Image: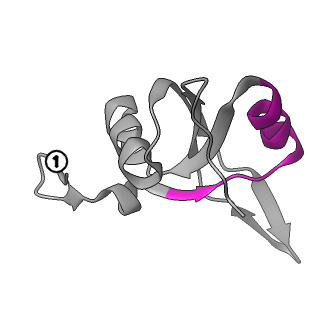
Amino acid sequence: MAIRYQHGLTLEPYQIIYRPLVTEKGTHLSERYNKYTFEVNPLANKHEIKSAIEQLFNVRVEEVRTQTRVGKPRRHKMVMGQMKSWKRAIVSLHPDDRVTFF
């Protein structure tokens, strides 16, 4: 199911979900609370993220929480720069479902 935006852009499920975030905190959430974290497209909303996860991993999603992470300032030698901003989604799954990344 492709998502069409007002300006003609169409996103497929694999374009909404960039990658899973495998961190220490994310691993703790997945083992204890059956919640998984993903880096997602900043244009996607919660309903689109839910449908993309359900299609890509064949699981039932109960809840989606999103966070927009602001890029941090970084310096390279004498030049100040800015890291890009990105969006993170924390997805709660049905208790019977699991996602395996490896």
- 24 relative position to 38: left or right: right
Q: Position of residue 2 (x, y in %)?
A: 19, 54
| Magenta region, residue range | 18-32
Q: Nearer the viewer, residue 102 or 49?
A: 102
In this view, 97 is above or below 76 = above
Residue under label 1: 5
**Picture quadrant where residue 76 is located:** bottom right
- 61 relative position to 95: left or right: left
In this view, 27 is above or below 20 = above
Q: Nearer the viewer, residue 12 or 96?
A: 96
Q: Residue at x 44, y 32 (%)?
A: 60
- Amino acid type, label 1: Tyr
Q: Is residue 96 magenta?
A: no
**Picture quadrant where residue 81 is located:** bottom right
Q: Residue at x 54, y 25 (%)?
A: 94
Q: Residue furthest front?
A: 96
In this view, 84 is above or below 50 = below
Q: Which element is circle 1 on? A: loop
Q: Can you see residue 43? A: no
Q: Nearer the viewer, residue 60 or 1?
A: 60
Q: Residue at x 19, y 51 (%)?
A: 1
- 50 relative position to 37: left or right: left
